[in-house]
Amino acid sequence: MSEPLVLGIETSCDETGIGIVRGRTLLSNTIASSMDEHARFGGVVPEVAARAHLEALQPSIDAALAEAGVGLDDLDAVAVTSGPGLAGALMVGVGAAKGLAVSLDKPLYAVNHLVGHIAADILTPDAEPLEYPTIALLVSGGHTSLLHVRDLTTDVELLGETMDDAAGEAFDKVARLLSLPYPGGPEIDRAAIAGDPEAIRFPRGLSRASDLAKHRYDFSFSGLKTAVARWVERFEAENPADAQLPVADVAASFREAVVDVLVTKALAACADLGVPRLLLGGGVIANRRLRDVALERAGAAGVTVRIPPLSLCTDNGAMIAALAAELIASGRRPSTLAFGADSTLPVTEIQIAEAVPA
Amino acid sequence: MILAVDTSLGTAVALIDSDGTRRAEAATADPLGHAEVIGVLLAEVLAEAGPGDITHVVAGMGPGPFTGLRIGIAAARAFALGRGIPVVAVPSHLAAARTALETETGPFAIVTDARRREVAITVFDGADADGVPNILTDTVLVKAVDADAHLAGVRRIDVAALSAVDLARVGARALAAGRTLAGDEPLYMRHPDVTLPGAPKKVGS
Ligand SMILES: [Zn+2]
């Protein structure tokens, strides 16, 4: 089977993603988001997300099939995210994927969400094939991970990850401190336009020499969030009640701290491991400042940066289908039906529950 | 044939003929692990039943703990989508009542665990003209310790595992009578546990 037609189901967070690919060709990337339902809570509420997945799945599958111009009978395989992610949300996708695969009597591939973010790159139209090894920096509201990718389907290593909040979560929390709406990323970006990124020197988490010994590639954003909160409190305490908080400067300086630590650690990994390639993925890549700083500093360091189209950087089912298509092309057997959702699935487990040959 | 799937308590899957004859059944009573077993149970039931067209999928809509309940509904809907056949939504307590009606006369209450020290209670009395268990009082959540007082003498039947065969049979009766027994929304019985954020907490300096 040279060009397998695969439908991918992704429900690890607040996006119900249905993707259809033929080999490395994207046919549909259909996404239903419950983001608006979470807005008034200031962050993703797992039970709200899971309920929304159940409602959105069938219409999303219908829409994806219509857009791709294929029928369910045409599929060669079904793929689904097994983890990592929100357990209750993941389980909706796993239940649906199993029901669909058994109904159609088609093979099912259970795959890793984070590796899916890397696989998104191969769907980029007219792109040169992904070269290995590459360092991958995945940044979203749910994860902040630095990976060493030697091969997409067989060899992905976790170099580091966040010890507390994901970078996207930090944006949401700081936005709340500044009375900006959810989701925080685009709001902070907007507020930062008129701000000076060097106005306030916020801390870079896990960047001191003593931290680097143990956490060279790990991230921490909760200290940064607290530092912003303290700065705002002190400003309010030291100024008259009607004084305007310099939101633009706070937003720009906070964003600079996040971007700086992300790019510094990613390029350190490139240098340490002698890998002159960096792949960016995850919804926070939509942040313009992050892309600009990464491109500029990587260029100076002789590192090539790849960024998939933003519609493939946020959580989606196409990347899940793409990863399964690569697994199929490399001769991997389908998963058994006996797997579950694994909210903390390690990145080394690229495919889950591969069947043993009879 | 009619397929039925329920994950409101354990995981239960069954196939019946449209006249109600049991063709195949597979279940686990484990109140967890629905996502792990649902595919295997579906495949087992299809294999056991042998050839034959499936015309409808009956989904047990709860009440039940949210996370598990949804898995069966998601699987039932996706299975139906794959075959291009309709889903018939049935409240899960109707399956338990259908089973109980084989021995019960007069009013009885189906009582299932709703977690958080609460139980879900539906009171039934016989079956109606269509052969669907007759609901005397709608499903309510009651503190487990208050359940007996709430029932005030109505015979109490505690149910820990459902028969998907009986779920399918209730669905078949509803289909034959052209009736709708439940909406698209699962019988969650509770709102998501969330509180609106207040003002940011002070961190002090
Ligand atoms: Zn993601």
Image (spheres, rainbow, N blue to C red):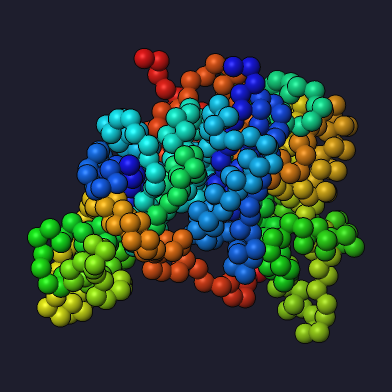
Question: Which residue lies at the image location 15% right of the left edge and 64% below the top edge?
Answer: B157
Q: Do we see residue A117 in this rendering?
A: no
Total count of labels? 0
Q: Residue B90 in the image: state x and y as whole percent.
A: 35, 59
From the viewer's side, name the closer residue of A124 and A169.
Answer: A124
From the viewer's side, name the closer residue of A141 and B56.
Answer: B56
Question: Which residue lies at the image location 47% right of the left edge and 66% below the top edge?
Answer: B192
From the viewer's side, name the closer residue of A106 and B58.
Answer: B58
Q: Residue B76 in the image: state x and y as whole percent.
A: 41, 47
Q: Quadrant of the N terminus of chain A?
A: top right
From the viewer's side, name the closer residue of A45 and A299.
Answer: A45
Picture quadrant where residue B17 is located = top left
Q: Quadrant of the C terminus of chain A?
A: top left
Q: Residue A336 in the image: state x and y as whole percent.
A: 41, 28
Q: Residue A48 in the image: state x and y as whole percent.
A: 52, 61
Q: Is residue B37 above or below residue B71?
A: above
Question: Which residue lies at the image location 70% right of the left edge and 20% below the top edge?
Answer: A132
Q: Is residue A156 above or below residue B128?
A: above
Instruction: Tell me: A74 left or right of B165.
Output: right
Question: Which residue lies at the image location 29% right of the left edge and 50% below the top edge?
Answer: B168
Instruction: Tell me: A299 left or right of B122.
Output: right
Instruction: Tell me: A358 left or right of A124.
Output: left
Q: Do we see residue B120 in this rendering?
A: yes
